[in-house]
Image (cartoon, helix red, strand yellow):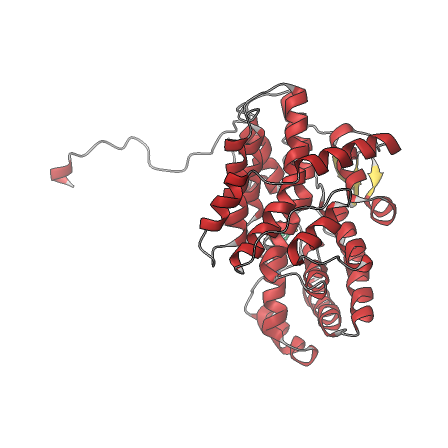
Amino acid sequence: MTATKGLEGIVAATSSISSIIDGVLTYRGIDIDDLAQNATFEEVAYLLWYGKLPNRSELDGLQKQLDQYAALPQGVIDQIKLYPKDTNSMAALRTAVSSLALYDASANDMSPEANLLKAIKLQAQLPTIVAAFSRIREGKEPVAPKQGVSIAYNFLYMLTGKEPAEVAVKALDQALVLHADHELNASTFAARVTVATLSDIYSGVTSAIGALKGPLHGGANEAVMVMLEEIGSTANVEGYITNALAKKQKIMGFGHRVYKNGDPRAKHLQKMSRELGKLTGNMELYEMSVKIEELVTGQKGLKPNVDFYSASVYTTLEIPRDLFTPIFAISRVSGWSAHILEQYQDNRLIRPRADYVGPAGAKYVPIEQR
Ligand code: ACO
């Protein structure tokens, strides 16, 4: 038995949800470029769960369910009020999502209908959790979700308490489409491993949030913003990047395990970053990002991934830096839950082996003789 570090190149599941073939990403066979330009996030979530795009009445039905479940159980809001104000936002989200199970009488109902409904509930409730957490830590009351509006609209509304600008809703909606699913990425794999023991969907999504938190995965979008803030201006980019690469530091938002010729999602976020910069009259973050890309691609051959231009997009939308990764989770819960449902359909325990490299034939030594 020989281990493959990081399971690189290992095919660990069959799935009909999303594919990455020759650098092209599809959700249920539809090219991400097509979806990014034409679909709403709600249509994409439906597509991931049901395997087809919704017709008008199916989409209206989903909207009604999202409206019905977007409010949080009072117990979860009360718990969020007890979190330390400076707690890590992904730790808060992970804890709150785990708590949702305590208030759902169907949490351990394993019927396919109950699990699908829980996927929709989680999709409805994650944006409310993130917005409520953000307001509560600022000493404000959470804003109740609005009915009949998109998830992108509702999230911005619950975060600020104000009606969001159309351009901001459109940008966030497209970002949610782009982040919704991504084959067997680390957090989706974590979700599938957890539910393959026939554990419940809340446990699966809680595991996934823990995996997404790390800077090698979803946490990279926040890390990109930390870097942009450290660099400070376009004039400082060259010195900073050349120095970082010389020290063999990783540049956050670059490289990908699967895409070696570029992440197809990055160009949409780059365009969005440029357009939002133009609209707000502040191109500094966009220009810094482009310069970083030129240098990292030129010197290392590495291309930006989905996280790189997300950072300038979300900052231009005036979203606090530490909510970038929770926003990733708000989108990816659609994909996680679709994978969880797929795992349940044809489940087998996921239990690989390890290549043991420790000592052999060791003996127990009594404590007095150690
Ligand atoms: N900056 C500088 N060098 C890099 C970077 C980077 N961002 N990414 C990879 N490299 C280098 C590595 O140092 C390594 O060089 P070496 O062969 O000289 O040692 C080589 O490229 C291969 O890199 P690995 O880390 O082995 O590639 P792996 O496939 O394991 O990792 C990963 C992929 C984690 C995405 C990596 O590129 C990385 O750490 N990027 C920065 C973090 C990031 O942006 N993560 C978000 C990924 S997208 C997502 O999850 C949503």
> Which of the two residues, 93 or 69, is positioned nearer the viewer here?
69
- Viewport quadrant of the C terminus: top left
> Which of the two residues, 323 or 153, is positioned nearer the viewer here?
153
Left or right for 275, reference 119 = right
Is residue 336 positioned above or below 213 on the image? above
> Which of the two residues, 309 or 119, is positioned nearer the viewer here?
119
Residue 131 picture location, percent across and down: 62, 52
Left or right for 135, reference 295 = left
Residue 262 picture location, percent across and down: 75, 54
Residue 77 picture location, percent across and down: 53, 45
Residue extending farthest left: 368
Figure quadrant of residue 367: top left
Residue extending farthest bottom: 235
Callout count: 0
Residue 3 picture location, percent across and down: 52, 36
Ligand 1 image-quadrant field: bottom right
The residue located at (55%, 26%) in the rendering is 107
The residue located at (83%, 65%) in the rendering is 275
Figure quadrant of residue 70: top right
Is residue 223 positioned above or below 285 on the image? above
Q: Is residue 22 visible?
A: no
Is residue 355 positioned above or below 267 on the image? above
Q: Is residue 93 visible?
A: yes
Is residue 105 positioned above or below 219 on the image? above
Left or right for 54, reference 207 = right
